[in-house]
Image (tube, rainbow, N blue to C red):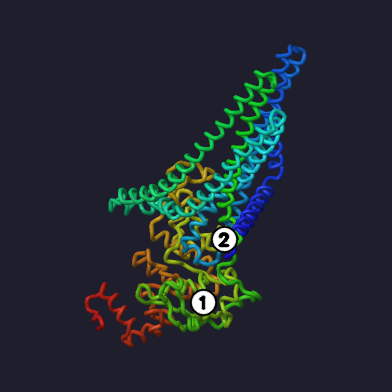
Amino acid sequence: MSDGRPQAARGLARCAGRAAATVWRSAPVHVLGYLAVTLVGAATPIAVAWLTRAVLDGVAARRTGALLALAVAIAVVTTVAAAAAHAGHYLRAEVDRRAALRAKDELFAAVSRVTGLARFESPAFLDRLRLAQQSASNPGRLVDTALTAARGTVTVAGFVGSLALVNSAFTVLVLLSALPGLLIELRMSRQRAAMLWRIGPAERREIFYAQLMSTADAAKEIRLFDLGAFLRLRMLAELRTVNAARRRLDRRELAVQAGLAGAAAVVAGAGLVWAILAAGQGRLSVGDVSMFVAAVAGVQAALSGTVAAGVMAYEHLLTFHHHVAIVDDGPDLPAPGARPALPPLRRGIELRDVWFRYSPDHPWILRGVNLFIPNGHTVALVGRNGTGKSTLVKLLCRFYDPTRGAILWDGVDLRDVPPEALRARIGAVFQDFVAYELTAADNIAVGDLGAAPDQERIERAARDAGVHDALAALPYGYRTLLSRGFAQDPDDGESDADSGVLLSGGQWQRLALARAFLRRDRDLMILDEPSSGLDPEAEYEVHGRLATLRSGRTSVVITHRLGAVRSADRIVVLAGGVVAEEGTHAGLLAGGGTYAELFARQATGYRDDVEVPG
């Protein structure tokens, strides 16, 4: 079996290079300044120790003439050191800010390049993304710890040289005493990184429960069903799991640190005893004793700081590895080779023996679906829950690729088309549309960002969706923020915590429809339960508007309200992952199959004289 340590070492070295490059590109001038003040800080203790030695020897020898110059020199050195320390705090903060900005941009640019949905439904990917976000929040800390380690190294080198002038054997002993601490700290750092990965799922669940209890979306049900205590206990249980893992490691670290501190104290105490005895025998001067004491303390402190900084940098590298893994991850969906241009739809879209399941461990959702969607026609997908209707829509948008079979756009396999080129030709309203906490205008413009500056186009889409009057009546019109979680933009007038506005469910549904109307010129329109949040009168009106929108365009409509698809050119009934029936409304009713049964059962909710088949 090959040893994985060299490979792991190369991986860490690569992460270190990436982190350093990110920080350097973010703030090169600030990094150089931080390096300069770091070196000043490293040299200061050594200079002060030598100057103190000279002062003490001068006092003992009664060389008063040189004492004033030495005092001035100490004052200058300490002043410069204090100024460098303050400058270092500012430079470190600025490097952190700039590097975090760049790292987050890099990370979320990579996340945006994920074109499908599978990774966002993977717990392992979500755990990695959480750790990557943590490391991206402060990549400059890697450089900070590296410079701290460098400063400690310079300080150690200076004090070791000073200590060696007094007693070389004792110098070797002090250095060797730090070696076990380094090895132990590195091992503890690996254990901490592994622990962070293990507790990741528990931390995400804790955050989930906390957010659930503190957001407006779930507030009604939580209070109606009295779920507060239930969710709070779940959150605390996850937090206790996380705390227990951290506590175990902290206790091990406490024991190790106590042992290392005790060993360092023994070495320092032995050295101090030797120095005092040597001074009593006349082999060391008072200045030599002060230099020896300062050197021993300085070497141990610098070694401890260097080891701690090095271990912290190592731990950050282990976390930054997740950032690099996501940024460097390949495409989640196979990229087309020749990348052919997607022609405007002329003939239609064909599903040819399409099979799909979400993973080898999941059951088949679609089992050999064969379906043709003619250009310019409306095809309605109906069926019971779980028959694959929404999955089929995901495949049409290429959020997933078929496990087997193919989907052809005028004969072109969608796998040979860049996802962004395909999606630019699709307009859609999804059942689980997003209510963005943005302004009303922005909530519509997300349907086509190119329309954002065109207020007339935004308002025309809102009128087509029947929501213009409601938006125009808001406190700031289309500039009104649709949120209770954020305050209205101060530029729109006096702002306060209550200035955001929430729409009703039906208004949000219409606003989502407005996004589809922005894309009225697309080749394919997908409408997944487009009127699920509307009352009967509004539903009738919206379906009339949608009929105008669909006219002459290729459309796929998914709905459980079968009365809304009577005018579809073709109705496709999915059952058991296959096409069970296909035809017009009248033809399927005459056939007396699944569609007729579903339609009759739904009609009984409105009429008492409908006989249910079977």
Where on the picture, by quarter, is residue 272?
top right
The residue that label 2 is drawn on is 112
Residue 97 position (above or below residue 533):
above
Residue 612 position (above or below residue 526):
below
Name the amino acid type tagged 2: Ser
Q: Residue at x 37, y 79 (%)?
A: 576
Quadrant of the snapshot with the C terminus: bottom left
Where on the picture, by quarter, is residue 39?
top right
Give the numbered dot on residue 553: 1
Where on the picture, by quarter, is residue 449?
bottom right
What x and y, as percent, mark residue 540?
37, 70
What x and y, as percent, mark residue 140?
62, 45
CA–CA distance in space, label 1 to label 2: 30 Å
What x and y, as percent, mark residue 105?
60, 53
The earlier-in-sequence mark between 1 and 2 is: 2
Name the amino acid type tagged 1: Arg
